[in-house]
Image (cartoon, rainbow, N blue to C red):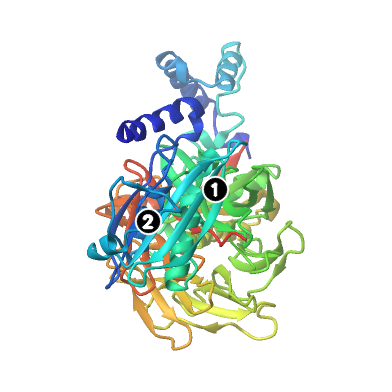
């Protein structure tokens, strides 16, 4: 399952993009990325994403954020297929752990918002659990309104912050 | 000379102690008591050249109290044992006079002695002597201001208590401990991740808080004198909202280990975790009542968040009862140390600080701002400190429980949040 997520052509295309990208911003490259590119350069079929397919833009689990309506703590039905993809991956990789991080907009008080953010991460956890993902693989936590992705105070900024993210632990 | 020194000394201090120098908190008094008691605090003898001026601390504390007016702002020194010129002070409309002397001791400490007089009656009201280190002269000023308030009003002063709050600059969060006026700040913790919900132990020696340094909310108990800390609770999910029992043996906390956020009680050493609230909704922000018999908390079990109260043993015996009814959103309950009041934040236009007198159930709105949160009572129950925004700036604000005396505490260019007002010491 893990390997079936990508075909060889996709991986080659990605590798080319990465190689070009590396030349453009070498200072921003982490050591393990350099390691990965060396391996592929020497003829290995491993791509940069072999150990972290969730970071592959072509992967069905690349999208890891779930957005919520104002005052809502229910995962949108349009996100069900994305939940399915994450569940499939986690069921096929039983050692893979994730932290689900819930967030709120800045309306409301600190601790209550922390609990509301947790309600969002827990909504994602429940759906994954219903699809068979083991509780031992998941932890639902919250940042409340403490770590806003958008600091913009307008409606779009607030909507960006009503969110739960699945974070894969390496 | 004095002016040059006040300029020069802070710079010297920054150079010599480096990381101990932090941006100054500014206090703006935005409301005072209906009547202000006129008092003259003359310049204490022999404090010229010292790192802090006791006289300035006393005058500033009395001004911050909101119920005193400083009649004297001059530099004329009057010794503690001098015979006061009562007719002169009477003509300047002072009703009380405080005079004092700072004496260096052989061991490097300073003895600060002061005497308080009733000007109209031409008689001494007593005084006190405080011995402090060179670096603790502000402490002597706070102790004398507390003594003045106690002798003139019968009320225990709060100037010697401390504050904790979180300062955010760029991506750095600092948990600070300061004097009651926000001055003399020391850093207890610095982190690149958020720090929230500091809570003082009743003996003032430890602060519990929530730190996100391990990418999730975890509760720590931090001993201020040593900087040593323990993880109080790091259960799966969120660990937050610590608050101490009045005897300091336990804390009430909010955990999501059972998936929905519920209230638990845990021993101060991290043992003996026990769930006390029982709902399928959010139960959080627990606070022990002053007598230690009840726990107040925020719950949205009825649809919207409201303040509830349960017995300290939890809901297994009897379900919690609802306490707030006036607003559709009520969070962040805080009990006054004297057991008379419940402060909370309600959505009422904006998010505004409310005060309920527990005996009558009467609720008063104390502010006009729209982003109030995290209220905290002064040890004498007469003041509340809270975080808010003024003209878009994140600041701390203080208000007296009668709503009259108001101050704004800010650090220009920094975000200041999550205040917690410490207990009386001793």
Mark 1 or mark 2, earlier in chain: 1
Is A88 left, or right, of B100 in this rendering?
A: right
Give the x, y percent position of residue B318.
65, 86
Q: Which chain hosts label 1?
A: A
Q: In which quarter of the image is the C terminus of chain B?
A: bottom right
Which numbered tag is attached to residue A106?
A: 2
Q: What residue is pinned by disc 1?
A: A85
Farthest residue toward the top? A42
Q: Is residue B330 above or below residue B419?
A: below
In the rendered image, the residue lying farthest to the bottom is B360
The answer to whether any part of residue B390 appears in the image is yes
Q: In this view, does B306 lie above or below B12?
A: below
- The kind of secondary structure element at disc 1 is helix
Q: What residue do we see at 32% from left, 71% from top?
A: B120
The image shows residue B268 at horizontal and vertical percentages of 71, 59
Kindly identify the residue that appears in the image at 61 percent across and 15 percent down. Answer: A39
Distance, label 1 to label 2, CA atoms, is: 30 Å
Residue occupying the point 32% across, 50% down: A157
Quadrant for the N terminus of chain B, please: top left
């Amino acid at each position: 399952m893990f390997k079936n997520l990508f075909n060889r052509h996709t991986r080659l295309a990605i590798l080319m993009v990465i190689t070009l990208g590396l030349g453009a911003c070498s200072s921003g490259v982490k050591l393990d990325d350099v390691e990965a590119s060396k391996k592929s350069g020497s003829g290995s079929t491993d791509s940069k994403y072999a150990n972290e397919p969730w970071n592959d833009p072509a992967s069905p689990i690349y999208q890891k954020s779930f957005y919520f309506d104002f005052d809502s703590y229910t995962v949108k039905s349009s996100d069900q297929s994305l939940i399915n993809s994450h569940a499939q991956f986690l069921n096929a990789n039983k050692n893979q752990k994730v932290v689900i991080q819930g967030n709120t907009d800045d309306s409301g008080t600190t601790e209550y918002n922390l609990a509301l953010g947790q309600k969002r991460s827990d909504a994602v956890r429940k759906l994954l659990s219903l699809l068979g993902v083991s509780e031992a693989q998941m932890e639902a936590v919250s940042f409340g309104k403490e770590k806003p992705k958008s600091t913009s105070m307008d409606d779009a900024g607030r909507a960006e912050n009503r969110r739960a993210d699945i974070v894969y632990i390496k | 000379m004095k002016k040059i020194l006040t300029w020069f000394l802070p710079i010297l201090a920054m150079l010599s102690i480096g990381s101990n120098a932090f941006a100054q908190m500014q206090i703006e008094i935005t409301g005072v008591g209906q009547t202000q008691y006129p008092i003259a605090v003359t310049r204490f003898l022999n404090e010229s050249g010292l790192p802090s001026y006791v006289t300035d601390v006393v005058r500033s504390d009395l001004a911050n109290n909101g119920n005193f007016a400083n009649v004297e702002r001059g530099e004329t020194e009057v010794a503690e044992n001098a015979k006061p010129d009562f007719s002169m002070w009477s003509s300047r409309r002072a009703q009380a006079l405080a005079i004092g002397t700072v004496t260096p001791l052989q061991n490097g400490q300073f003895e600060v002695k002061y005497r308080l007089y009733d000007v109209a009656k031409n008689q001494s009201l007593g005084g006190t002597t405080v011995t402090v280190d060179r670096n603790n002269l502000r402490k002597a000023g706070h102790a004398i201001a507390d003594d003045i308030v106690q002798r003139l009003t019968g009320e225990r002063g709060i100037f010697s208590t401390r504050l904790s709050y979180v300062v955010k600059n760029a991506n750095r969060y600092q948990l600070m401990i300061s004097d009651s006026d926000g001055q003399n700040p020391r850093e207890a913790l610095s982190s690149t991740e958020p720090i929230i919900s500091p809570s003082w132990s009743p003996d003032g020696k430890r602060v519990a808080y929530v730190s996100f340094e391990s990418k999730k909310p975890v509760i720590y108990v931090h001993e201020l004198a040593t900087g040593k800390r323990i993880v109080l609770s790091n259960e799966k999910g969120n660990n937050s909202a610590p608050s101490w029992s009045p005897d300091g043996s336990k804390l009430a906390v909010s955990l999501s280990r059972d998936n929905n956020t519920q209230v638990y009680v845990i021993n101060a050493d991290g043992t003996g975790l026990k769930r006390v609230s029982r709902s399928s909704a959010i139960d959080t922000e627990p606070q022990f009542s002053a007598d230690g018999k009840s726990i107040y908390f925020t719950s949205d079990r009825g649809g919207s968040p409201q303040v509830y109260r349960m017995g300290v043993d939890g809901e297994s015996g009897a379900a919690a009862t609802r306490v707030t009814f006036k607003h559709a959103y009520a969070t962040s309950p805080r009990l006054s140390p004297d057991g008379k009041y419940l402060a909370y934040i309600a959505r009422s236009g904006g998010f505004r600080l409310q005060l309920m007198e527990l005996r009558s159930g009467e609720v008063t709105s104390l502010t006009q701002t729209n982003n109030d949160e995290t209220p905290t009572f002064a040890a004498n129950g007469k003041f509340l400190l809270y975080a808010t925004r003024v003209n878009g700036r994140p600041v701390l604000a203080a208000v007296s429980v009668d709503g009259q005396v108001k101050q704004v505490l800010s650090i220009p260019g920094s975000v200041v949040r999550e205040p917690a007002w410490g207990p009386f010491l001793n």
